Amino acid sequence: MNPQPLITTTEAVDKAFYVIFGISGIALLGITVAMVYLVWRYNRKREPVPLSQKDHNAWLEATWIIIPTILVGIMFWYGWEGYLSLRRIPDNAIPIQGSSRMWSWLFTYENGKTSDKLYVPVGQPVKVLLTSEDVLHSFYVPAFRVKRDCVPGMENYVWFVAEQPGSYDLFCAEYCGVAHSSMITTVEAIPATEFAAWLKAQPATADAGKELLQKHGCLGCHSLNGSPMVGPSFQGIGGRQVIVVSGGESRTLTSDRTYLEKSIVDPGADIVEGYPPAMPPYAGRIPEEELAGMLDYLTGLNAKEQSAEVTGDNAVSEAVKATEEKESGQSGQPAEATEPVNHASPGEDLAGKNGCLGCHSTDGSRRVGPSFKGLMGSERTVVKDGHEVTVTADADYLIRAIRDPGAEIAKDYPPAMPPYPGLSDEDIKALQAWLETLE
Amino acid sequence: MSEEHAHIVPYKTFAIVWIGLLILTGITITVAQYDFGAWNVWVALGIAVIKSGLVVAVFMHMKYESRLFKLSLFAALLILAVFIGLNFFDVLYR
Amino acid sequence: MSEVTATASNDRGFFGEGNYPGIFGWIFSTDHKRIGLLYFWSVTIFFCVGVLLGLLLRLELFAPGETIMSAQSYNATFTLHGVIMIFLFIIPGIPAAFGNMIMPIQIGARDVSFPKLNLFSWYLYITGAVLAVTSLFTGGGPPDTGWTFYVPFSAQTSTNVSLAAIAVFILGFSSILTGLNFVTTIHRLRTKGMTWMRIPLFTWSLYATAWIQILATPVIGITVALLFAERVLGTGLFDPSQGGDPIMFQHLFWIYSHPAVYIMVLPGMGVISDIIPVFSRKPAFGYKAIVVSSIAIAFAGSLVWAHHMYTSGMSDMAVMIFSFLTFIVAIPSAIKVFNWLATMYQGSILLDPPLLYALSFILLFTIGGLTGLVLGAAAADVHVHDTYFVVGHFHFVMFGGTGMAFFAAMHYWLPKIYGRMYDKTVATVAWGVIMIGFLILYISMKVVGMQGMPRRYYDYVPEFTGLNQLATVGSWILAVGLILMFVNIFRGIFKGDPVEANPWGGACLEWQIPSPPPTENFGEEDPVVTHGPYDFKKAGIL
Amino acid sequence: MSDHVHKDYTGAKFGMWLFLFTEVLLFGGLFLLYAVYLARYPQEFISAGKELNVWFGGGNTMVLLTSSLFVAISITALRRGAKRLCLGLLSGTIACAVIFMINKYFEWSAKIHHGIYPGSAHLKEMQPGEMVFFNLYYLTTGLHGLHVIIGALLLVWAMFLIKSDRVNADDFVILENAGLYWHLVDLIWIFVFPLYYLILH
Ligand code: HEA
Ligand code: HEA
Ligand code: CUA
Ligand SMILES: [Cu+2]
């Protein structure tokens, strides 16, 4: 429908600015000059008595109703026209998912690759589909004059094209809580060829496995980025602890290759707790070698690496960078080969998914909230109903801290933590198990 | 102390209006059993408007008040309509 | 009430004996002038608190990173700054303080229609203010949502937003009662000969304002009530996981809060419309056009709320409609500006402090209004929405507009009310300093906004440092000017030289009675009005 | 201060009307949300609306209309000097208010018994549109119920003044204003009833 864009978003918006500033500048100048002149010319020292008592003039008044009406009409038109350019997505725009949460961005590209900076090819329009996982955020790139809110429960979009390679600031422009002003990242505009190479460079086991998942429709129900869909996410699925219900009894299993295979061919046997028994059995529908490829891929998806990509905090983006460097150097080499296989626990996975690590560090350093390191079992001073009390950080305390963070505020910290009604008791247990390992 | 003491509305008028209101309530309940599709809301609202018109005009004496009262009421309802109406430029076209 | 008539001859006017001894004579008084002064002092105190918070914001922004406070305190500070300035200063500011003091006199009434209700609404104001302050120290601590209380954040944060919502509800109620009182008063209590076309423009502007207060304020009432329910009862009307729509909250919020900006500015425009004729010795040019434009602003101002939401994800159709209507509402404002200028033409202009502040209103409001047009244009707004450009815009219209009008009103009417004059030279110097500080402070904000600095940012990228420091320096200059102005005017009204009934040569009724005015305003007989409010010839000024 | 100025009846009544406008706009916010969400979830509103009992709603409509009649007549009665009748009618109105609230109590408790109330687990399992419907239903009828209580209290106050003759055939504006308030409560219900209980059948 919309062929190549005739103008970039920057040009479209700037045109409106020029027109409006131009008209306004003239009006302001005229008014200021008139005011100064009148005060000087008709000063009481010069004119002790007023020269007239005239109090209306129909023609004059009509003039200064009609002329501004025309002027604002013009302003409206340029504003609206420019806005339309922002809304008409060029056909060849590359779609990128942009998801926001307190207080980080996550961009997912067509092939499933994710990053916390927005990588775009120079000279090629991109369309960013904006969603939010918690409160309002707003995607704002001043250089491209685009801004759009990310609203939970809704998908918005922006499009733009970077004409020059470079790194452009990307701000969160809708107030979203204590770290609103650090919800900043960048748009990295790189030449199209480099972009293509970057996109191909896959973390861990590459495309083959994912293409299989895509082909068999698995990704319609399972995400790769941690968000639960109809089924649990594949993020970190390789080797994680899962609680399953089998024949009415729940037990905890390690999701190893055998488990995964069984889950695919006979999904009804063990149902992951909290999910409906909705998955169709694939026995006999997937050729042997394809199933093997899938399992290779899934077991390779260990939580450590992935949660690293998801949370956008500094320590983590280091990790992303490291991964990326590694990839560009030795792409194709599976990650397991270079890193010890997964010791990520479900708790750590949850902490990454829910953005805890955006506010709590694991290395003892202070962020928005207290560090998780050595937290469990320690004595905490908290402010409760205006009084300071000391409590022990036990399982119960953890539940209170997560369910009703406002009730007890860790001393010297702001009451900034949002409540997490979405975390089940099991989730909190898993978090606890993980927190206890952080000595 | 003159204008406002003019109208003493007789009991009978009130009683008639009351009966009218009860009948209209009956009608609106009956009519609700039939399906007019998208018009359901408008039919019900139409009857409600007639009913409230009666209450305002007679029970609340608006019929006997000066133009100022009537204009103000009109202004208030107009603004309410505008507040609700303009929202639909968003809701219907999203 | 015979003793009341007796005090009328007393020099101290309505400052004489009250109905109750001491302070009770004030806080239980139903005299509109006393209530006006109660408002004046409460509003001024909150204004000072508000500007101090503004100063703190600027200090924090002097350099990137943490300068004087943590991110959480910063967020609480600008929320409080916004809430105080909007709900405790600028909305009640001119109508409840100066409107109460002056409006009944201007129409030749002895009091407002419902004096007890008038006092009650002051108590509501104080209650709301106390609750707002209480919310800082109770529950989860100071609210950190910004004055706009957008959901879902406001529904989730563990700070004490619920109490703040109640406070806003009560303050809204207070505002409604003032409006209701004024409309009734202006309709019912005009004295003989005070026809509609002889009403002073200040009173006209209050009339238009009062209608907005009555018809728009309930909407903020229900909005904050729903926010409260969302937090306390979990009703989820704006919660997407319960089928709600967060954008509807924004609609409801702005349905009130946009008309509210005209509650803020219309009375200010009224002050200017009253001052300019007096200091130019010429009738207000285009009196009828100014009257009609006030009403037009009040009505058309109710149709444009969604221009705050161009990027929110509402439909493009709505963007077009609301952008168009926004431009329409600029026209009546333009009419006023041109009429004020035409009033000065061929006049005899005396540059006394009230006129100086009035002229700075015109300049600053025009700049603010024109940047409002930038925001009204959809494409331009996409770039500058929620940046410091918006912050610059609204400080220009609110502080440069209404704030300056408030100062103008202080310099114009306080001598009347207190019967004493301030030092005019100091007032002029203070004016100069304020203007310089103001322009440096807020123009820097606009520029840094154009460069893309988002608002409500505790920390910023290093590129923005220079302009932020300039702004902070501007705020210090402004502070010096404001302190000078306040000190001068307060010295003046308590210690200055006595003034006669009509120090400026005004032709409205308030200048025909002694300064300070007597308790019942007029003697035994109600005044009879025989000429228009700016007919200086018939009033014997010329 | 203004005691020696004659009482401005029209002014007092006008002030009351202005206040009623604010009430209308207060409820207007809820009606606005109703309209918007109805447009968005027409099917869910119908299915959720079926849960509401027309007889509770219809019964309460009759009760309120009748109470409005009593109030209207009571003013005429007072002005004609029939003080006893006036007081009797007002007691009737208050009785209606009580019946209304009792009715409401049963209606709400039946709903709550079924696990339908804001934030309940049962509600959370419903369609989004249905949740919105019930949340709106509780808020609207709740706010309306609050107004019923306030209106009844105003009438009780007016009754005291009538008893002591401070409100009488010549000076009845307080009764008239309290009556206006009561009619408003009725008016709101005239819209709430079809919108929540009927449209959706
Ligand atoms: C006193 C308060 C006040 C006043 C009077 C105004 C007046 C106007 N405002 Fe402003 N506004 C605010 C207070 C005010 N505003 C506040 C507080 C916010 C931010 C809220 C928040 O998010 O926290 C805001 C935000 C705001 C936005 C949203 C910005 C955003 O968040 O993206 C917009 C967008 O359209 C806007 C537009 C306007 C317009 C068009 C006018 C017009 O009424 C201006 C009309 C005046 C003139 C046009 C100047 C005079 C005319 C002439 C000199 C003649 C020459 C003119 C022509 C050629 C036409 N305002
Ligand atoms: C009338 C309204 C009004 C006024 C007058 C002001 C005045 C000031 N405001 Fe304003 N401001 C708002 C209304 C107002 N503000 C609103 C509504 C917001 C939005 C809040 C939100 O986002 O939710 C806002 C937001 C806002 C921000 C943006 C915060 C952010 O987005 O991160 C900033 C930042 O600099 C700021 C600064 C200032 C400054 C420096 C002043 C200066 O004018 C203050 C300088 C003056 C002084 C320092 C005076 C010193 C004088 C005295 C103390 C008096 C002494 C008294 C006696 C002797 C008796 N304000
Ligand atoms: Cu995210 Cu601000
Ligand atoms: Cu606005």
Image (spheres, rainbow, N blue to C red):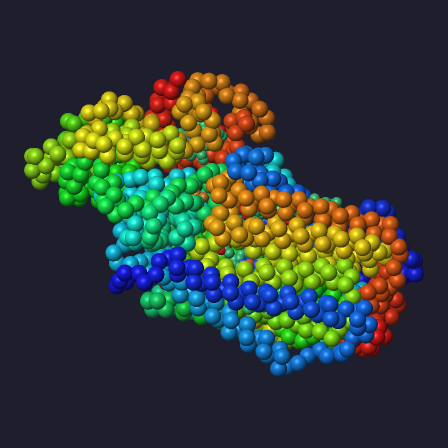
Asked which quadrant contains residue C189, the reply is bottom right
The residue drawn where x is 70% and y is 64% is C272
The residue drawn where x is 47% and y is 57% is C381
* Residue C292 to residue B94: above or below: below
Instruction: Provide residue A367's location: percent of width, then percent of height.
Output: 46, 29
Q: Quadrant of the C terminus of chain B?
A: bottom left
Is residue A48 at all visible to an observer of this figure?
Answer: yes
Give the tally of numbered discs: 0
The residue drawn where x is 35% and y is 67% is B38
* Residue C232 to residue C408: above or below: above
Q: Quadrant of the N terminus of chain B?
A: bottom right
Asked which quadrant contains residue A260, the reply is top left
Instruction: Provide residue A405's location: percent of width, then percent of height.
Output: 48, 32
- Residue A330 shown left or right of residue C88 in the figure: left
- Residue C109 shown left or right of residue A181 in the figure: right
The residue drawn where x is 24% and y is 22% is A340
- Between residue A103 and residue C510, name the one nearer to us: A103
* Residue C280 to residue D144: above or below: below
- Residue C356 shown left or right of residue C302 in the figure: right
Instruction: Provide residue D133's location: percent of width, then percent of height.
Output: 40, 53
Asked which quadrant contains residue B33, the reply is bottom left
Is residue D161 at all visible to an observer of this figure?
Answer: no
Instruction: Provide residue C506's location: percent of width, then percent of height.
Output: 80, 68
- Residue C205 shown left or right of residue C458 in the figure: right
- Between residue C300 and residue A13, name the one nearer to us: A13
- Between residue A89 and residue B6, name the one nearer to us: A89
